Amino acid sequence: MSQAYDFAIFTDSSADLGEDLVREMDIQVLPLSFTIQDRTYHNYPDNHELSPHTFYKMLREGQTATTAAVNVEQYLQAMEPQLQAGRDVLVLAFSSGLSATYNSSAIAAEELREKYPERKIYTVDTLCASLGQGLLVWLAAKERAKGKTIDEVRDWAVGHKLSICHQFTVDDLHFLKRGGRISSTTAFVGSMLQIKPVLHVDNDGKLMTVAKARGRRAALKALVDRMEQTAIDLRDQTVFISHGDCLEDAQLVAQLVKDRFGVKDVYMNYVGPVIGAHAGPGVLALFYVGVER
């Protein structure tokens, strides 16, 4: 536990931040859980319980996964030691439009405020997912590293969360159909015609289809086209890309944004199993700061 800061930043594993950034930025990550083949795993940043590659291989072989949010007890157990050590707590949680994780954090925070009235305990519904959430958390940690107070970092996160743009596409419509995101007819026709949806996370933190493309390559290009419409100062940004075990496609998108916009820095990681269970192998997502979502 780092002594460098007077407040801790917590997030959850749906942020899809790798162990490298988590350690570098001193971020506390609570794991969501998932169950596949009758066994339940926790999704830690270092993936020590099950590798993402193995998880996606199981999905490709026809296995089905279910997921569970971070619960109140997990938050209590993680946050209390920080409070006991005299540190305040800022939680930046997975979108309430997609998970009960934020609600769990808010309940735990309310309980802990009664017990530690002298401490500041803030929870923020990021309305973000995957490395969009990760990007907001990473940028907030950079604000803390500049010497900002917990109130300033909380206000920064609230003020900037709707500037985190999420553009993504899926390769297998079966997973969106199973999760009720699209109808059986849409999934069947789309699969037959190789129609790939382009989706984003809207201002309510929910998934929305914004375009359709014919074929995988066109869908990947559409992500970059949408980036051009909304992004700001791309040359000075670190762009985040997450993928469902399709590294070559992720590298292609990374090269497109570098060539087209002069982006210098790209951070890449897997879409974790909690979101991957609902988006499927081949999901690919692009995240950046824009004027609006």
Image (cartoon, rainbow, N blue to C red):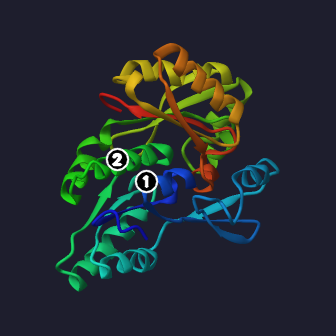
Type of amino acid at the residue the image marks with label 1? Met
Residue 118 relative to residue 8: left or right = left
User: Most extreme residue toward the right, as rendered?
Assistant: 61
Q: Position of residue 33 (x, y in %)?
A: 58, 66
Residue sitting at 28 percent across and 80 percent down?
Answer: 112
Seen in the image, is 245 located left or right of residue 232? right
Residue labelled with disc 2: 142
Task: Give above or below for 55 relative to 71.
Answer: above
**Which residue is at 36% across, 51% downward?**
141
Q: How far across and how far down the image is residue 173, in percent?
A: 66, 38
Three-letter amino acid code of the residue under disc 2? Lys
Under circle 2, the secondary element is: helix
Q: Is residue 224 above or below residue 72?
A: above
The residue at the point 67 percent across, 34 percent down is 171
As rendered, which of 76 and 139 lies closer to the eye?
A: 139
Disc 1 element: helix
Q: Point out the residue furthest to the bottom here.
A: 115
Kindly indicate whether the residue at mark 2 contacts the one at mark 1 (C-beta within 8 angstroms): yes
Residue 142 drawn at (x, y percent): 34, 47
Residue at 50% over, 30% down: 265
Q: How far from the left and from the top, in percent, is residue 113? A: 23, 78
